[in-house]
């Protein structure tokens, strides 16, 4: 009798376990790939996104994060997201511009002159309009994350204005806007995958690079660079995207969960970036010479940057360019 009761109890227990497993099995499982080193603001924001989605979907959605270029560089991740091999990504807009020309807009130097300018442009109607064009590329654009404004580092000389960049071999994203910008500044731009930059600098394949402080710190570029100029020339924008089929596979209630989680991730990344930047500057100030631009040096850079706009307004359309400039300037 006792044995039978144990047997029955075991069967009941097993049924309960199977029932619980069924109840909590994820209906959707998505891969989220990015190139960022764990611990950076946007990598931490990706973890926050995962936490929000899994909690608020009651386990109906599972997010598998593949960080630190495990699945390739940004261009490879974009292509995999288009094909549905990856479902979620946060590629830089500079790389996305190779697929959707209107993304060129956000990597024009000195278009955004601060955080409020950035928010007006990215979080408003212009930003949404550009995200919607990604449907042509089998992507659903959700919002924009970011890692702060980019700064320039190099091993040749201190940069006080564009003339100081003459002939310096600068690594840039594989993005036409950035290649054109550095040619306008007089440098010799070279496209190189993010994960190869440290070795490229160490070996002298390139002499300088540009990135936000979070990336300069996490990749330890200050170990192989002598000078850093605080140019704040471009906001390092990531477009949070999903494979279009993956997005459309979600019912409306789960689309809202995912969209809300993307907004939490965006705000968290920006908050962490602002907190980290002051600490980073304090931490690396004895390891790299930090140069602040004078008003005259800044104006010289802006004048050179203006020469790019006629070329790229043809790609983003003159009308969109004009509206974006007004919004960024708050006029």
Image (tube, rainbow, N blue to C red):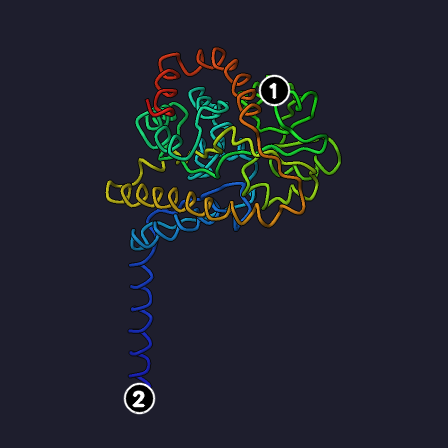
Q: Is residue 316 above or below residue 231?
A: above
Q: Is residue 51 above or below residue 131?
A: below
Across and down, in percent, residue 315 comes to: 45, 14
- State the residue at coordinates (38%, 50%): 62
Identify the disc placed on residue 185: 1
- State the residue at coordinates (65%, 37%): 196
For the residue labelled by badge 2, is the local secondary structure a helix, a strand or a loop? Answer: helix
Q: Mark 2 = which residue?
A: 2
Across and down, in percent, residue 270 comes to: 42, 42
In this view, the residue in front, 206 or 99, is 206
Position of residue 262 in the picture relative to residue 38 (left or right): left
Q: Which is in the foreground here, disc 1 or disc 2?
A: 1
- State the residue at coordinates (30%, 83%): 4
CB under 8 Å between discs 1 and 2? no
Task: Tell me if residue 209 can be seen.
Answer: yes
For the residue labelled by badge 1, is the local secondary structure a helix, a strand or a loop? Answer: loop
Residue farthest toward the left in the current orientation of the protein: 253
Dot 2, how many residues are within 10 Å of its Cα: few (below 14), some (14-19), or many (20+)? few
Q: In which quarter of the image is the C terminus?
A: top left
Residue farthest toward the bottom in the current orientation of the protein: 1
Q: In which quarter of the image is the N terminus?
A: bottom left
Q: Is residue 41 above or below residue 128?
A: below
């Amino acid at each position: 009798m006792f044995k039978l009761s144990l047997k029955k109890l075991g069967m009941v227990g097993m049924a309960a376990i199977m029932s619980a497993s069924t109840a909590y099995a994820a209906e959707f499982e998505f891969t989220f790939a990015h190139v960022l080193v764990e611990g950076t603001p946007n990598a931490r924001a990706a973890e926050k996104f995962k936490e929000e989605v899994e909690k608020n979907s009651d386990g109906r959605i599972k997010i598998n994060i593949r960080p630190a270029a495990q699945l390739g560089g940004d261009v490879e991740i974009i292509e995999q997201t288009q094909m549905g091999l990856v479902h979620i990504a946060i590629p830089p807009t500079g790389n996305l511009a190779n697929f959707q020309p209107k993304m060129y807009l956000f990597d024009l130097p000195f278009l955004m002159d601060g955080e409020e300018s950035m928010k007006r442009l990215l979080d408003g109607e212009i930003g949404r309009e550009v995200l919607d064009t990604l449907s042509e590329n089998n992507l659903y654009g959700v919002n924009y994350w970011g890692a702060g404004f980019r700064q320039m580092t190099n091993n040749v000389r201190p940069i006080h204005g564009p003339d100081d960049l003459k002939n310096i071999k600068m690594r840039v994203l594989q993005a036409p806007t950035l290649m054109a910008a550095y040619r306008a500044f007089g440098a010799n731009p070279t496209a190189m995958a993010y994960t190869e930059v440290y070795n490229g600098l160490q070996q002298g394949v390139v002499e300088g690079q540009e990135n936000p402080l979070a990336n300069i710190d996490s990749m330890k570029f200050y170990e192989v660079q002598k000078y850093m100029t605080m140019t704040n020339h471009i906001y390092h924008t990531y477009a949070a995207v999903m494979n279009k089929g993956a997005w459309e596979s979600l019912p409306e209630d789960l689309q809202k969960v995912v969209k809300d989680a993307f907004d939490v991730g965006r705000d968290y990344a920006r908050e962490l970036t602002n907190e980290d930047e002051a600490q980073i500057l304090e931490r690396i100030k004895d390891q790299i010479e930090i140069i602040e631009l004078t008003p005259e040096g800044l104006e010289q850079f802006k004048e050179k940057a203006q020469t790019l706009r006629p070329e790229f307004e043809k790609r983003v359309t003159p009308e969109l360019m004009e509206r974006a400039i007004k919004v960024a300037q708050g006029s």
